[in-house]
Image: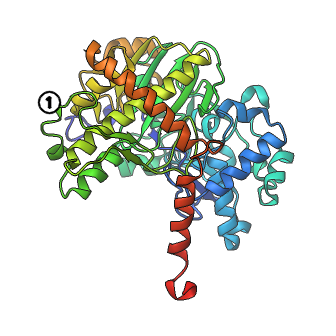
Amino acid sequence: MKQAGISGDQIEAIALDTTGSSVIPVDKNLQPLGEYYLWCDHRAKGEAAEITAAAHREKLEAIEWCGGVYSSEWGFSKLLHWLRHNPEKRNEFASAFEHCDMVAATLCGLTDPKKAKRSICAMGHKWLWNAKLGGLPPEEFLTKVDPLLTGVREKLDGDYTTSDQIAGTLSSFWAEKLGLKAGIPIPVGAFDAHWDAIGAGCRTDDMVNVVGTSTCIIGITPSPNLVPGVCGVVQGSVHPLRTGIEAGLSAVGDIFNAIAARAGTDVASLSKGLENYRAGQTGLLRLTWDNGDRTVLVNPNLRGITLGWNLQSTAQDELFAAIEGTALHTRVIFDRMATNGVRVQRVINAGGIPQKNEVLNRVYANVLGRPVLVPTKSVTSLGSAIFAFLAAGTFKTIEEAQDNICPPFRVYEPDPLEQRVYDEMYRLFSRLYFGFGDKRMEMGDVLPSLIRITEFRHKTPIAETA
């Protein structure tokens, strides 16, 4: 408020987006029973595999709405992991919340978990909630996954709604702490990438790459298209009146930072001169699985691969190859969507990285073979502002708000010569992607085996195996 030069009584609404699944178990008074399981936490990969197997065994229709594979990054996996590893706290467990719902309930002064509204965006994408299928998975299914989930369905029950609805109003306690006026509306929250897509100007049939530490690929479609390996098809999740679709990469900016850190520098310094690089010139082909695969393999038991090293290869070469790798992986996802009936009219690069990395935008346009639109100003949290404006009554529709406050686009057109090179690289990338990533393929056991070996070594002291 100080930076904007306004007073607290001028704030008419607050809208809240968060990472997800970021899961917090709570007691009957809505008090946390531990730390959050943050969005990128993969500790629950065993639980995720059990949920996936049970879903197919029991023919749970909801699993098809998240691509056929349940992820270790999602709510039920993390909750089951928590229940298994915190037996002393099970008796206190009253419910679990996504961060966007927890923070809204807290600011509204709620102390009863049953009175907190829940985001369709969060619960639909990560907790198998589906209005057409009766909400959450049946109690019978959950108890077959593990008896520890007995009663959890009821504890997660409540008012599930879209972000054009109000979660509550700002309590006097938090109004005083924040220097605002009590009673202003707080709409139902959502995940950051979904609202960032709205802030980037996403309309029906658009696909937005929200590129940051990871990438969330968020689109709006007029009707549901279920896509194998694409993790979220949820009606009302992005736009309250349309179907949202989500995919993504488990690490992008984190990979760039790791490469720079290993080289003893930072990404900005290492990026100097990348504008002179051209398609394939490094001789490197990089699979960007450093934190596993979110889409389309949904496999946390993968790690990065770089092929083509020679004695002259540099850290800067690897950084450029990583940018190419994230673009090639994005093309895999777009191709999977296209073959399953998802129409993509425009591609928009949003998030923090495209604003300051023209090389990435150029590479994406050439790899995807289509224009890439980039907002001329930062749109991070602009989607939150749009939903706050709706709650305050400033605008009547999302589209009206977008027309008034979303910035125009810079357009990156593909270069035909670069595009031809990337078409050839994409054929190689696809072979490697499925050859090493698909458990059913000949090389599909290599990376999981390496992970198993290193986990064993870290858990077992040398003296015990001598």
Q: Residue at x 63, y 45 (%)?
A: 439
- The residue under label 1 is 276
Residue 420 visible (yes or no): yes
Asked whether 64 or 366 is in front, the reply is: 366
In the image, farthest residue toward the right: 140
Instruction: Please identify the quadrant where the N terminus is shown.
Output: top left
- 52 vs 311, left or right, is right
Tag 1: amino acid? Asn
Mark 1 Cα shell of 10 Å, populated few (<14), some (14-19), many (≥20):
few
Horizontally, residue 170 falls left or right of residue 351, namely: right
User: In the rendering, at what x and y percent does residue 442 appear?
Assistant: 61, 45
- Provide the secondary structure element on which disc 1 rests: helix
Q: Quadrant of the C terminus?
A: bottom right
Q: Nearer the viewer, residue 398 or 344?
A: 344
- Report the front residue among 420 and 216: 420
Position in image of residue 407 (x %, y %): 28, 18
In the rendered image, residue 53, in percent from the top left (x then y), is placed at: 76, 46
> What residue is rendered at 44% in x and 31% in y?
428
- Tell me: residue 313, above or below residue 229: below
- Residue 267 left/right relative to 16: left
